[in-house]
Image (cartoon, grey):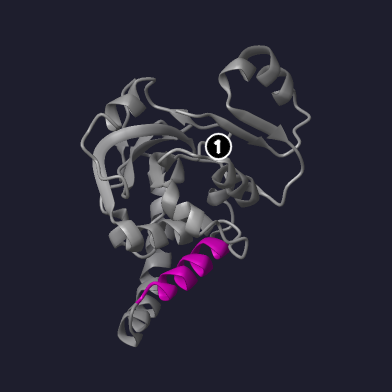
Amino acid sequence: MEYIIIDGGSTDGTLDIIKKYYEDYIDYWVSESDKGIYDAMNKEIDLAIDRWINFMNAGDRFYDENLIEEIFSKDLRKKVLIYDDAILMPLNIIQKQENWHLDILKRIIHQSIFTPLVCLKKKKFNFKYKIMADYDLVRYCINEFGVVYLDKIICYYDYNGVSSKPLFYYFHECLEISKKYSSNMIEKFKIYLHIIPRVIYLAIKFPIDYFGVYFVKHET
């Protein structure tokens, strides 16, 4: 495995921690101003040389220290997008990811995804999308290489991150990206029919999530 850290010029002591504890274990790290999270992730794509890549952001972490070894001990095709479940923090609830790619507007968690690097070298994150560039890129990779769901918990995910912010961008960008990957006018029309009840559904669902109604409570 290779470890790459792209820091956006932090002044909160991040660099001191890297230098003191982790510098000998990291393949490459840099701290410099950038154009946002997707710019940083594109830099990681340029630097990475292995078969798959996982983007783990500040505040997120893997579920188990042996998890990566366990996943890649399986007989997986070299060019396939691998995804699993995540624990939403600080809610401490499990978000099941199974079949999320079949729902045109379902939220994804890229921290729980291992993406073929060969795919990312061909197409990077599009700065046009403020919070859903990962959704756009994942849809592209699925079309190119296919997808595998392993039914495992991959990570702890900070539910208060950038993608939880304004729902307007979430719905607007999901709709635009989904239309791009639809093959005909009928499918595009279905997306417009789908968006209204979906907005109503999510407006009700998000508050209920906090009470664990639609998610499985994670027992620690």
Against 80, residue 87 (above or below) is above
Tell me, yes or no, whether the highlighted magenta stretch contains residue 181: yes
Tell me, yes or no, whether the highlighted magenta stretch contains residue 200: no
Q: Is residue 132 visible?
A: no
Question: Could you tell me residue 151's position as x and y percent?
Answer: 24, 39
- What amino acid is at disc 1? Asn
Q: Main secondary structure of the magenta part?
A: helix
Q: Residue at x 78, y 30 (%)?
A: 11
Magenta segment range? 168-182
Q: Quadrant of the N terminus?
A: top left
The image shows a total of numbered marks equal to 1
Q: Is residue 78 left or right of residue 115?
A: left
State the SS at label 1: loop
Question: Could you tell me residue 9's position as x and y percent?
Answer: 76, 36
Q: Is residue 167 left or right of residue 76?
A: right
Give the residue pinned by disc 1. 57
